Image (cartoon, helix red, strand yellow):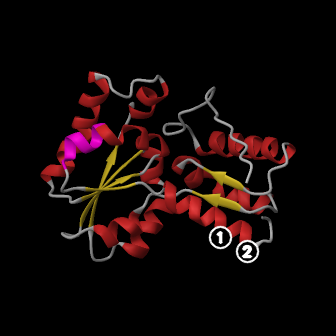
Amino acid sequence: EDLIYIADSGFAPYGDKGIDFIQERSHKLTRFLLEQGAKAVVVACNTATAAAVVSLRESFSLPIIAMEPGVRPAIAASRCRRIGVLATQNTLASKQFLNLVHRYAANVTIFNQPCPGLVEQIESGELDSLATRRLLERFIQPLLKQGVDTLVLGCTHYAFLTPTIRSIVGDDVTLVDPAPAVARQVGRVIAANDLR
């Protein structure tokens, strides 16, 4: 498949933006992708998914595939039933995330960790800097003290920090990045809609 990618670098990150703003941007970007010939759209941002995916699906007829923090795979992977979620404040406070936790996490303890400033570090290319590492340590250490054995990367930006995160948490903590599952879902959706 051909991929058309648009990054909203002029307005990102969305983690501290209002819902109305995120919805307006999401609709504008979706219209742009449609003008480029897109046959399906992936909302590759947990915060945009939380704020806008319902509205997008109501407004556009093409398949809209959304990101969501990998709570379900984290539950499957966790041995001690204690899971940490790194995400933006907007994602963690969203109705979609709260519903996800309510639906699937009845028998586990979820520790939410908002990560203000982390997306900005990544966007500025500071993937390996000491400042980024210290920020990660500040966010991750409380989760490790709670005994989490599984850590959800609840923002698509955070995958770029996987090596640093791994060096902080060690090999005994499972990292869950939902992106591969979303890619598989795209394949299923376009096949089910005869769009291949």
Q: In this view, does 28 lie above or below 71?
A: above
The picture places residue 24, in percent across and down from the top left corner, at 71, 42
Q: Mark 2 points at which residue?
A: 192
Percent across and percent down for residue 178 are 46, 57
User: Do callouts 1 and 2 mark residues in contact (Cβ within 8 Å)?
Assistant: yes
Which kind of residue does numbered mark 1 sit on? Arg
Q: In the rendered view of the protein, which quadrant contains the N terminus?
A: bottom right
Describe residue 92's horizontal placement relative to residue 143 as left or right.
Answer: right
Viewer-closest of 164 and 71: 164
Tally of numbered tags: 2
Magenta span includes 169: yes
Neighbourhood count class around disc 1 (C-alpha, 10 Å): few under 14, some 14–19, many 20 upward: few
Residue at image point 60% right, 66% down: 185
The question of residue 134 being in magenta is answered with no
Residue assigned mark 1: 188
User: Which residues are the magenta region?
Assistant: 164-170
SS category of the residue bearing label 2: helix
Main SS of the magenta part reads helix
- Front-most of residues 107 and 65: 65
In what element is the residue under mark 1? helix
Question: Residue drawn 63% across and 26% down?
Answer: 10
Under mark 2, the amino acid is: Ala
Q: From the viewer's perspective, is residue 191 above or below residue 26?
A: below
Give the CA separation, mark 1 to mark 2: 6 Å
Q: Residue at x 24, y 29 (%)?
A: 134
Say few, some or many: other residues with alpha carbon within 10 Å of mark 2 (under 14 / 14 to 19 / 20 or more): few
> Quick check: 183 left or right of 102?
right
Where residue 55 sits in the image (x, y, percent)? 70, 57
Taking depth in this image into account, of 119 and 113 the one nearest to the observer is: 119
Quadrant, the C terminus: bottom right
